[in-house]
Image (cartoon, coloured by chain):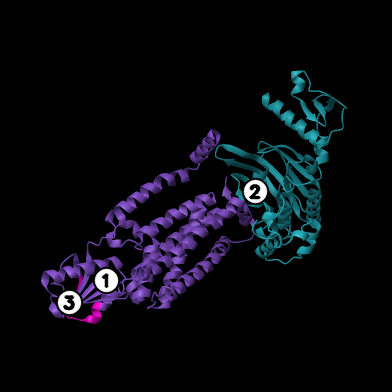
Amino acid sequence: MLAMIVKEFRQLRRDRRTLAMMIVMPVLLLVVLGYAASFDVSSIPVAAAGPHAAAALRGPFTVVATNPHPDAGWARNQLRDGNAGVAVVGAGNNAKVLVDGTQLFTAQAAERALANTKAKTNQDPAVQILYNPGLKTSFVMIPGLAGVILVFVGTVVTSLGVVRERQAGTLEQLAVMPLRPADVYLGKIAPYFGVAVADLAIVLAVGTSVFGVPFRGSAAVFGLGALLFVFVTLGLGVLISSVSQTQGQAIQLAIMTLLPQVLLSGLIFPLSSIVAGVRWIAYLLPLTYFTEISRGVMLRAEPIGALWQPFLYLTLLGVAITGLATLRFRAFLSPKES
Amino acid sequence: MDWGATDVTVRFGRTVALEEVSIKATKATVTAVVGGDGAGKSTLLRCVAGALAPGSGTIARPEAHRIGYLPPGQGGYEDLSVTENLQFVLSAYNIHRELDDYLERSGLAGVRTRLAGHLSGGMRRKLGVIAALLPEPELAVLDEPTTGVDPVSRADMWWLIARAAAGGAAVLLATTYLEEAARAERVLVLDAGRPLVAGPPGEVVAAMPGAIVPVPDEPADQSERRRAWRRAGGWRVWQPDGHGGLTPDLQDAVCVAAINRELSDAG
């Protein structure tokens, strides 16, 4: 047994990436779960339509948009476009409060705060929860989970593709064959792209038919967002593959990109609840923007104009990651300088 | 047109893998690179095939679609069948060939639907050789095509290699087997990244200085022991100034060259 223990320690000592992951991952998880993971909503963004519309609200409400007229259409649009979690139309007992049900924890906090407001001010405004009246978790999770599955196929599975060639010794043969790096790159990712698209279709079909998740927005806008997202995740997969020596290393790195995306993208914990010191990481993660797009389009029928920011950031991430992956891949296939 | 390398030097960090090595692969001939482990055979072949850029020296090779390359230890994608592996090569080179002839002659016809990963080591290597020769390349670079392969399969492979050369290909192969190298038109023996001897096998043997004397046991004399090697159940001793003795073959000539260099290096 001692012989095995000594052998394992020697191998582990030389596998620095695994060693680093074994040390870094617990620390990372501790920081993320300790500081970042919180379901508490400390501030609820409010759109106020009409004079003194939000004056009676008590609790963690913060007015982020105002309209001098009690325009219900404007108020709904503020929720639809994700500018606010709560909209108040009118004032006093005639006030109507609209709550965005797709922001689950914000909506639940708003319900509690509105009950508190009623007890303190004796005003009882009509409350309507939009987009997810039953505040169902599945409505909020499934659009985001579609993204997680795309990350799994796009990044984790793709990352194995290139490194498998390297380990098998076939990459050198590819490098000598009359194939352009672009042929090899696109030929490598095309099947995974197809699988990712099929997976997405399955997730959406199951989500809408089994879990009753609505698809209210434009399929074209959703498709464009998904396309961009798959583009980024595939690029990330190839990038990971090109810096890994073994399939084990590729899986480790892929999981290290998957885990923060699941924890920090707003899929589980509301972005506003993540402490600022950690929240910046969320804005570097592609899933953050895809979750915003998929929830916005599927649940709130958000138009592309209102989603320009996640589309822009996803495009920038796509260009940066795919550019880097292409460069690495090209270097990978070119004759190595001695 | 001759392909090959001229005065190629390759360094990996501080290690000199090849030092001013030249080799010529001529049309319709087989050229063998011989050497022990770490001699630099694979490095030289990688340079000629285009998988490695040398630090200095020049390489002459045809365009990528006219090169067939078998990397060391390669035998196709293990999760593709024999036929699928070859179809991939045809598709990558954008060519059409009848596979039956290759498969029949190499003994792979009966396993054409079997996954490469389920083939024996020898069969996989054969598959790799066929894949490299299938495009009917001008330059075929084969890194140890017969290592670890049974004698019957080796004969099959040599038939494939000879046929490629007869078809006009310049075949450059690496091998650890001197008896195999003796079948080549030209041979380059590498030792620790440096050329030891080069030329047609007959000329290499003819140019060997001195004589070889067979002895039954390891010589007791220290000086003789440095010039002796074990072979065919006995020992052979090189006499630098001797005459007559055994009729040497390529293996003897290479042993003598290695001993000669060792003695020269030791001063």
In the picture, which quadrant includes the N terminus of chain A?
Answer: top right
Q: Are marks 3 and 1 on the same chain?
A: yes
Q: Amino acid at mark 2?
A: Arg
Residue A68 colored in magenta in the image: yes
What stretch of residues is rendered in magenta?
A64-75
The answer for how far apart the CA atoms under marks 2 and 1 are is 59 Å
Q: Amino acid at mark 3?
A: Pro
Residue ID for mark 2: B46
Position of residue B163 relative to residue B252, above or below, is below
Q: Colour of chain A?
A: purple
Instruction: Give the mark toward the camera: 3 or 2.
Output: 3
In the picture, which quadrant includes the C terminus of chain A?
Answer: top right
Residue ID for mark 1: A83
Q: Residues within 10 Å of mark 3 (few under 14, many from 20)?
A: many
**Which image quadrant for residue B67?**
bottom right
- What is the number of the mark on residue A125? 3
